Image: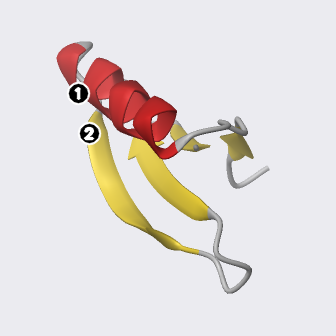
Amino acid sequence: MAHFGFRLAEEADLDRAVREVERAGGRLIRRGEHPDGQLFAYVADPDGYVIEL
């Protein structure tokens, strides 16, 4: 498995989740928008596991 993801309902939820990951020692890898308009962020936890939000 390359990564796993969580679907968040609102852009504010995505912003909050990225901040929490960073606060816990993780990092933002990439942020963007899928062709269908859905926003996403790839983050890595402190151990390097990639999660799509």
- Tell whether 25 sits left or right of 52: left
Residue located 79% across and 49% down the image:
1
Comparing 16 with 5, the one in front is 16
Q: Going from the N terminus, do you reach mark 2 or mark 1 first?
A: 1
Could you give the CA–CA distance between mark 2 and mark 1, rounded to whole angstroms? 5 Å
23 relative to 35 in the view: left or right = left
Q: Residue at x 64, y 75 (%)?
A: 37
Q: Secondary structure at mark 1?
A: helix
Would you say residue 45 is visible in this rendering?
no
3 over 9 or under it: above or below: below
Horizontal relation, residue 38 to residue 50: left or right: right
The amino acid marked with disc number 1 is: Glu
Q: Position of residue 46 (x, y in %)?
A: 32, 24
Q: Is residue 45 above or below residue 24?
A: below
State yes or no: discs 2 and 1 in contact (Cβ < 8 Å). yes
Query: From the image, which quarter does the C terminus lie in?
Result: top right
Mark 2 closeness class: few <14, some 14–19, many ≥20 residues within 10 Å = some
Residue 34 versus residue 3 in the image, above or below: below
Task: Name the residue beneath numbered marker 2.
Answer: 27
Q: Say left or right for 35 vs 14.
A: right
Q: Residues within 10 Å of mark 1 (few under 14, many from 20)?
A: some
Name, please, the residue furthest toward the top.
Answer: 24
Residue 27: x and y, percent?
26, 39
The three-letter code of the residue at mark 2 reads Arg
Q: Nearer the viewer, residue 46 or 28?
A: 28
Quadrant hosting residue 4: top right
Q: Residue at x 70, y 35 (%)?
A: 6
Q: Identify the mark at residue 22; answer none if there is no mark.
A: 1
Q: For residue 17, which quarter of the picture?
A: top left
Taking the spot 47% from the left edge, 53% from the top edge, the residue there is 42
Looking at the rendered structure, the number of numbered marks drawn on it comes to: 2
Residue 16: percent from left, percent from top: 36, 26
